[in-house]
Image (cartoon, rainbow, N blue to C red):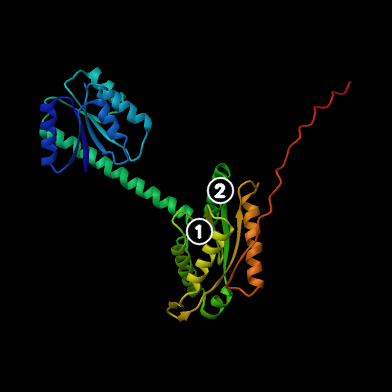
Amino acid sequence: MKILIADDSIVSRHLLEATLRKWGYEVVVACDGLEALELMQREDAPNLAILDWMMPGLTGLQVCDRIRKRAREPYTYILLLTSKSQKEDLIEGMDAGADDYITKPFDQHELQVRLRAGTRLVDLQAELLAAREALREQATKDSLTPMWDRSSIFELLCRELSRAEREGTPVGVVMVDLDHFKSVNDNYGHFTGDAVLCESARRLQSTIRQYDAIGRYGGEEFLVMLPGCDEQTSFNLAERMRKHLAQGQMSLNEGAIGVTASFGATVALPGQVWTPESLIRKADEALYLAKRLGRNRVEILPTEPVAPVSVVSQPESEPVAQ
């Protein structure tokens, strides 16, 4: 467990650091309040902090107050180190956001017990954050494949289109449909069909770039979002996905099964006015063109700009005389 100590007294700081290192803590040291605040705002900030009440730059109370106003995660457990012992002073410290306090000169056993309580709280919050992340994953990922679900990939596309419109960059959209997937279910059963979907999703996912996104749009259909890709790049990436999916049969319990897919692509170009629905519709048209032309191929269709809807305000009608 990493712990920050902030104290302007060299003697007190060295004694505290030596004690904490003896107990197995990784110690980060600050000599004043400003340095402590800077260290506590970093991405790798310690989750435990011992702050001296009186320090130059910023007091321990001021550092504590600013950290609490940021409401960062994960939580930082703050223990105030003070020579003050009046009830009013301690209440002031807790009001500033401190979790606990210890008076100078500190008793080692008391400090160890109070840090143990802080460690338990930090560990508990880490477990809660992990559980929350797991729930978020369940709420946004497809239940069968390791992909985004339909609503999540659509939301990602909406966000990416807004960003691309601001920055004047293109966005490629690709619809993917596994060829003759119904025959897999009919001939081998739905469990095998699920296994084929999972392996197909894995192969497609392994082919896209780190900043692309892919989701299961429904059944055996997938939606791929390609930020910054013009028509040629979108076609090339879709072709790469097609080849990787078709390369080598899938080894399943029922034997080896060959799987191919048809790809339909389109691109939202800078300067156009578009909607996510219109792009998906155009990619869908390209997909059905690929199927009509023999399947296991990539077709791309240009987008047709959607005219912006202008709202003309109507003048208020004159009141009718009674």
Q: Position of residue 155 (x, y in %)?
A: 54, 49
Residue at (50% x, 78% y) in the render: 258
Toward the right, the furthest residue is 322
Residue 183 shown left or right of residue 42 in the figure: right
SS for dot 2: loop
The picture places residue 173, in percent across and down from the top left corner, at 57, 57
The picture quadrant where one finds residue 121 is top left
Front position in the image: 106 or 292: 292
The image quadrant where one finds the N terminus is: top left
Q: What kind of residue is marked 2? A: Thr
Point 59% across, 58% down: residue: 231
Direction from residue 53 to residue 187 in the image, left or right: right
Residue 283: image location, x then y, percent: 62, 60
Which residue in the structure is indicated by mark 1? Answer: 214
Q: Which residue is mark 2?
A: 169
Out of 120 and 145, give the one closest to the viewer: 145
**199 or 107, which lies in front?**
199
Q: Secondary structure at mark 1?
A: strand
Between discs 2 and 1, the one toward the N terminus: 2
Instruction: Identify the residue shown where x is 27% and y is 26%.
Output: 34
Mark 2–mark 1 distance (CA, rounded to whole Å): 19 Å
Q: How many marks?
A: 2
In front of the other: label 2 or label 1? Answer: 2
Say above or below: 189 vs 83: below
In the picture, which quadrant includes the C terminus? top right
Q: Residues within 10 Å of mark 2 (few under 14, many from 20)?
A: some
